[in-house]
Amino acid sequence: MNILIIEDDKKIANYTKEGFKEEDFVVNLAYSGEDGLKLLKTNTYDALVLDWMLPGIDGIEVCKKIRESGSTIPIIMLTAKVFIEDKVLGLNSGADDYIPKPFHFEELLARVKALIRRASYKSNPHIQIADLTLDIHKREVSRGGKYIDLTPKEYGILELLVKNRGKIVKIKTIINELWENDSDISSNIINVYMHHLRHKIDNDYDLKLITTVRKHGFRIDS
């Protein structure tokens, strides 16, 4: 996935960039609204992380210009402003979400991924891998036309794997996405969920879709 960060504080910008790179994002940085708008004209991004207080054109104006151009790119705005009227102003300018500074990168990552998923759902609620089908809107799963009954957590894990098809999904990522960094959740618990999920998805089929990558995580392939 490709992401653009527009942030004039280079320490925050580089910290955020490195965090997204560790999660396998391709990241571009801009330190001003003008430079960010230029990058948006020449590149395609899955999401934009936009600081409010920028030199020259501030984040609100950048957001308005993006929406006036017809772009629907998911935008999350960063700001030190804390009053509700500021949040309303940011959202009314076209931002999809809003996170105050200082922030934890894990929360920013989770919100960005949620925005990207939401955008993808609008364009196509069905995901197909081999004979496995997910209906994102209904949260239903079938394989070979046969309905598969999953618990909410099993479905959440499967959706993460499917949306990252061909890539390793780390246990840490699963915990962050589905348990919100719950310190009581261990890798052993995730392994139990994966055992049940693999039984439901793969046991009755010759083609096995879910792979365990030892000491790293899990992957789903077509």
Image (spheres, rainbow, N blue to C red):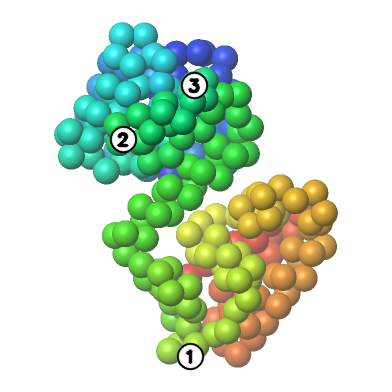
Disc 1 to disc 3, how far (Cα)? 51 Å
Left or right for 162, reference 200: left
- Decide which of 182, 169 is in the foreground and name it: 182
Q: What is the CA distance from the residue labelled 2 to the residue labelled 1?
A: 44 Å
Comparing labels 2 and 1, the label whose residue is closer to the camera: 2
Left or right, 134 with reference to 215: left
**Closer to the eye: label 1 or 3:** 3
Q: Mark 3 points at which residue?
A: 81
Residue 185 in view here: yes
Q: Is mark 2 on a helix, strand or loop?
A: helix
Image quarter of residue 200:
bottom right
| Residue shown at 70% from the left, 78% from the top | 196
Comes first in the chain, label 3 or label 2: 3
- Compared with residue 112, is residue 89 higher up or lower down, i.e. above or below? above
> Toward the viewer: 93 or 140?
93
- Residue at the spot x=32%, y=64% of the render? 124
Q: Position of residue 202 (x, y in %)?
A: 60, 81
Earlier in the chain: of badge 2 and badge 1, it is: 2
Give the amino acid at mark 1: Lys
Q: Is residue 94 left or right of residue 83?
A: left
Reply above or below: 53 against 139: above
Marker disc for residue 146: 1
Q: Mark 2 points at which residue?
A: 92
Task: Give the structural element (helix, strand or loop) at label 3.
Answer: loop
Answer with mark 1 or mark 3, whichever residue precedes in sequence: 3
- Residue 150 placement (x, y as % from top left): 60, 79
- The number of numbered badges drawn on the structure is 3
**Crowding at label 3, few (<14), some or many (≥20) Cα neighbours within 10 Å?**
some
Distance, label 3 to label 2, CA atoms, is 15 Å
Pointers 3 and 2 in contact (C-beta within 8 Å)? no
